[in-house]
Amino acid sequence: MNHFKAILLTVFLSLVGRNVFAYDACIGGIYYNLDNESQTASVTYANNSSIYVTNKYIGTLQIPNEVYYNSIKYSVNSIGEQAFSNCQNLMSVTIPSSVVSIGSSAFYGCSKLSSITIPNSVTTIDDRAFENCNNMTSIVLSDNLTSIGYGLFKECTSLTAITIPEGVKTIGDYAFQYCM
């Protein structure tokens, strides 16, 4: 048993001080997790600490429909959890029609993000995806959404226009708290 503990300790110590990445590839300045089996890509964040301190994305960002990595084509199908969280200098984002889901807190704290259009391909937007985007004045939601999650637009204090699609059956608690 002591031999096993020594091996485990050696492995642990060899990992200490190394960067732990939360992404598989950086393509065109955007970080992705890649699924080789389905050949899909999910936008993600740079590393474990970037969810708290990230200003990598500045100005306008266009997410592509597909990316190539090691000669393999991947369809960009989601924006992952906290992908752009706290990108305080991100002003606008173009989301492609290949995206079907937006993860929780994906755009949390993007304080300069002023407007966004969610393509009709998006069927799911998780909780707090746009919380504290206090410069956002308008948002166009996907016609295919069926629910608006918990705190989705909480503290979007400048939000003055939103059209809720007819298919939305539920609106989560605090979805629009401190808006308008």
Image (cartoon, rainbow, N blue to C red):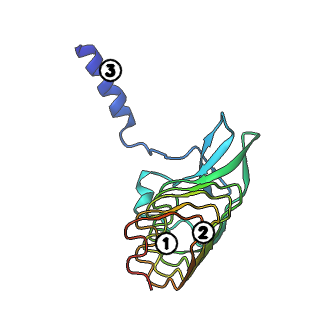
Could you tell me residue 132's position as x and y percent? 42, 74
**Mark 1: which amino acid?**
Cys
Residue 81's tag is none
Quadrant of the snapshot with the N terminus = top left
Could you tell me how far apart the alpha carbons at marks 1 and 3 are, in whole angstroms? 44 Å
Q: Give, as a three-letter code, the residue at label 2.
A: Glu
Above or below residue 158? Residue 131 is above
Most distant residue in the left direction: 2
Asked if the residues shown at circle 2 and circle 3 are in contact, with their CB atoms under 8 angstroms apart, the answer is no
- In front here: 38 or 70? 38
Q: Which residue is mark 1?
A: 110
Number of the front mark, 2 or 3: 2
Residue 135 drawn at (x, y percent): 50, 82
Q: Residues within 10 Å of mark 1 (few under 14, many from 20)?
A: many
Along the polypeptide, which appears first: circle 2 or circle 3?
Answer: 3
> Residue at 67% across / 64% down in the picture?
119
State the separation of the CA atoms marked 2 and 3: 59 Å
Observer-nearest residue: 101 or 19? Answer: 101
| Residue drawn at point x = 63 percent, y = 61 percent | 144
Three-letter code, disc 3: Ile
Q: Residue at x 65, y 55 (%)?
A: 99
Q: Which residue position is annotated with label 2? A: 166
Which numbered disc covers residue 7? 3
Q: Secondary structure at mark 1?
A: loop
Q: Is residue 30 left or right of residue 173?
A: right
Which badge, 2 or 1, comes first in the chain's sequence? Answer: 1
Q: Position of residue 87 (x, y in %)?
A: 50, 68
